[in-house]
Image (tube, rainbow, N blue to C red):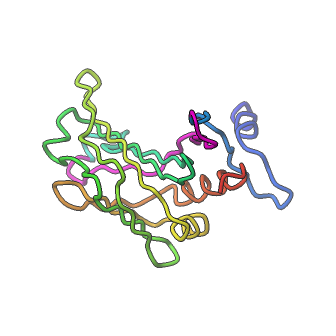
C-alpha cells in the first residue's frame, strides 16, 4: 500500500487519465550583464547499455547509464547527455567524444535528428568509484526542437573516437517530456 502512495505522490494525473511527468528546474540563474538567463531541468534517465560480452559481469546493473537534460542557456536550447561508464579505464576502450562529433537520434515514427557535439569530452575518471563520466552538450535548432518535442525516440548512435556505438532507448519519451516541460515553463 505504501508503494501506491509513493507512486501517486511522484506523478499527477490528468483529467483524461494520463500521467503528467514532473516538470522541475534543477538550476536557474540570470546571466550577468545580459537580459538572458540559464535554466536547466532535472536530468531524466534516458538509456542504459551493456555489451553482450559484459552482461554476465553486470548482472543487476548496466555498463553505461545515460541521463538527458534540456537547458536553455543564453537563448539557446541545449540537449545535455551525461554518460556514466562503470569503468575507470573506459577511455582506452571508447576513447573520447570530440567537439563536432555526431549524435544521430532515430525516431520511432521514422526519420532522424542529426546533432553535433558543442563541447566534446575527454571523460572524467573516478578511480575510487571505478567509473568514467562523459558530459556532452548539443545545441538544438528550431527544426530539431520541433521534432524532439513531437516524436518518441527509438535509438541513438553516438560517435566516439573509437567509432560509432548504437544504443536502444528504453525511456523513449524522456527528451519529449523535457521538451514539453521547457515549453510549459515558457522557455521555447
Q: In which quarter of the image is the N terminus?
A: top right
Quadrant of residue 25 within the rendered picture: top right
Given residues 173 and 134, the one toward you in this image is 134
Where does the image place residue 135, in percent across and percent down from the top left? 36, 42
> Measured from the top left, where is residue 123 in percent x and y?
26, 39
Q: In this view, does 37 lie to the left or right of 115?
A: right
Res 117 → quadrant: bottom left
Q: Is residue 165 magenta?
A: no
Residue at the spot x=30%, y=43% of the render?
63
Residue drawn at the location 45% of the way across and 56% of the way down: 139
135 above or below 104?
above
Q: Name the residue rendered at 30%, 49% in the picture.
A: 50
Q: Which residue lies furthest to the top in this view?
A: 128
Query: Seen in the image, is 63 located left or right of residue 109?
Result: left
Instruction: Look at 21% across and 47% down and name the residue there.
Output: 96
Count the marks: how many? Answer: 0
Examine the rendered structure and indicate whether residue 70 appears above or below residue 110: above
Q: Is residue 3 above or below residue 50?
A: above
Where is residue 29 shown, x and y percent of the image?
A: 61, 33
83, 117: nearer the viewer:
117
Instruction: Please state if 98 lies on the left or on the right of 73 as rendered.
Output: left
Image quadrant occupied by the C terminus: bottom right
Residue lying at the far front of the rendered structure: 33
Is 6 located above or below residue 178 in the figure?
Answer: above
- Spot the residue most to the bottom: 110
Magenta extent: 32-54
Magenta stretch contains residue 45 = yes
The foreground one among 46 and 118 is 118
Q: Which residue lies furthest to the left in this view?
A: 92
Amino acid at each position: 500500500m505504501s508503494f501506491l502512495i509513493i507512486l501517486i505522490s511522484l506523478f499527477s494525473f490528468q483529467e483524461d487519465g494520463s500521467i503528467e511527468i514532473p516538470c522541475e528546474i534543477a538550476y536557474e540563474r540570470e546571466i550577468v550583464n545580459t537580459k538572458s538567463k540559464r535554466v536547466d531541468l532535472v536530468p531524466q534517465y534516458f538509456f542504459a547499455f551493456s555489451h553482450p560480452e559484459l552482461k554476465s559481469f553486470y548482472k543487476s546493473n548496466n555498463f553505461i547509464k545515460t541521463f538527458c537534460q534540456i537547458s536553455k542557456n543564453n537563448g539557446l536550447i541545449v540537449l545535455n547527455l551525461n554518460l556514466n561508464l562503470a569503468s575507470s579505464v573506459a577511455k582506452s576502450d571508447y576513447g573520447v567524444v570530440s567537439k563536432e562529433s555526431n549524435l544521430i537520434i532515430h525516431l520511432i515514427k521514422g526519420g532522424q535528428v542529426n546533432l553535433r557535439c558543442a563541447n566534446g569530452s575527454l571523460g572524467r575518471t573516478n578511480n575510487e568509484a571505478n567509473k568514467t563520466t562523459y558530459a556532452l552538450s548539443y545545441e538544438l535548432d528550431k527544426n530539431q526542437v520541433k521534432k524532439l518535442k513531437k516524436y518518441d525516440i527509438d535509438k541513438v548512435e553516438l560517435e566516439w573516437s573509437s567509432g560509432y556505438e548504437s544504443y536502444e532507448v528504453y525511456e523513449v519519451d524522456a527528451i519529449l517530456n523535457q521538451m514539453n516541460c521547457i515549453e510549459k515553463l515558457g522557455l521555447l
